[in-house]
């Protein structure tokens, strides 16, 4: 039996792993992607019994799932220590597609050890669950804390409405510029 009928055979070169993977995945059919993955590193001996696929995903994730690759917001990566998609990214939509397909292959092929730190809200979104203010805490912690303070603020009982508004504005609405 032809192994290509049973497996999705992915031939890549280590030095051009991202480019080779992108080209192969763009040529692949949905049926190909549903087959068990077998990775072949061109010019190397070895039979993929799972180890080559793990090495493949480790090398690929070091190129795709980093704050430096352009897909993810570097500020969020630094402040929240998670990867969050950069809405101002200059990357092509195919780059985001590639990241999604790679994650899908990892899950579908039951590959452990992919070191990608997404916040729980990503998985809630994938499962089409409702999102709330608490989800913001994992992505933009400073904004979450500020909004929580704003929403939980209550004026002192003895203040009139006008005095309460003044206290609120002085607490939350002032902006300072130092020259």
Image: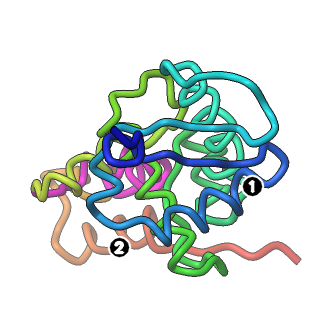
Q: Which residue is drawn at 79% across and 43% down?
A: 14
Residue 9: percent from the left, percent from the top? Answer: 49, 45
Whether the magenta-drawn stretch holds residue 82 is answered as no
Residue 25: percent from the left, percent from the top? Answer: 50, 63
Q: Residue at x 25, y 67 (%)?
A: 164
Residue 31 sits above or below residue 88 on the image: above
Nearer to the camera, 89 or 177:
89
- Mark 2, residue position: 166
* SS for callout 1: loop
Nearer to the camera, 171 or 29:
29
What whole-number distance in Å separates the C-alpha atoms at marks 1 and 2? 44 Å
Residue 88 sits above or below residue 119 on the image: below
From where the camera sits, is residue 154 visible? no
Q: Give the range drawn in magenta.
A: 130-148
Q: Residue at x 68, y 73 (%)?
A: 176
Return the residue found at the far front.
1
Image color mode: rainbow
Q: Which quadrant of the structure image shows residue 19?
A: bottom right
Predominant SS along the magenta part: helix
Dot 1 and dot 2 residues touching (CB under 8 Å): no
Return the residue found at the far right.
179
**Number of numbered labels in the structure image:** 2
Give the mark nearer the N terminus: 1 vs 2. Answer: 1
Whether the magenta-drawn stretch holds residue 141 is answered as yes
- Whether residue 154 sits left or right of residue 22 in the image: it is left
From where the camera sits, is residue 133 visible? yes
Number of other residues with Cα within 10 Å of mark 1, as a class: few under 14, some 14 to 19, many 20 or more: few
The circle on residue 68 is: 1
Number of other residues with Cα within 10 Å of mark 2, as a class: few under 14, some 14 to 19, many 20 or more: few
Residue 69: percent from the left, percent from the top? Answer: 71, 59
């Amino acid at each position: 039996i032809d192994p290509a009928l049973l497996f999705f055979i992915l031939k890549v070169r280590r030095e051009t792993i991202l480019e080779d993977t992108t080209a192969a995945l763009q040529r692949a059919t949905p049926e190909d992607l549903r087959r068990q993955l077998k990775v072949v590193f061109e010019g190397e001996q070895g039979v993929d019994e799972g180890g080559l696929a793990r090495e493949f995903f480790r090398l690929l994730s070091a190129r795709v799932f980093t704050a430096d690759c352009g897909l993810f917001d570097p500020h969020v990566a630094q402040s929240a220590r998670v990867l969050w998609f950069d809405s101002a990214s200059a990357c092509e939509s195919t780059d985001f597609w590639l990241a999604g397909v790679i994650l899908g292959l990892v899950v579908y092929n039951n590959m452990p050890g992919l070191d990608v730190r997404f916040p729980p809200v990503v998985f809630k979104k994938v499962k089409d669950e409702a999102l709330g203010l608490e989800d913001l805490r994992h992505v933009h912690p400073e904004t979450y804390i500020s909004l929580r303070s704003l929403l939980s603020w209550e004026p002192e009982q003895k203040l009139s409405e006008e005095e309460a508004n003044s206290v609120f504005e002085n607490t939350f609405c002032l902006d300072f510029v130092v020259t």
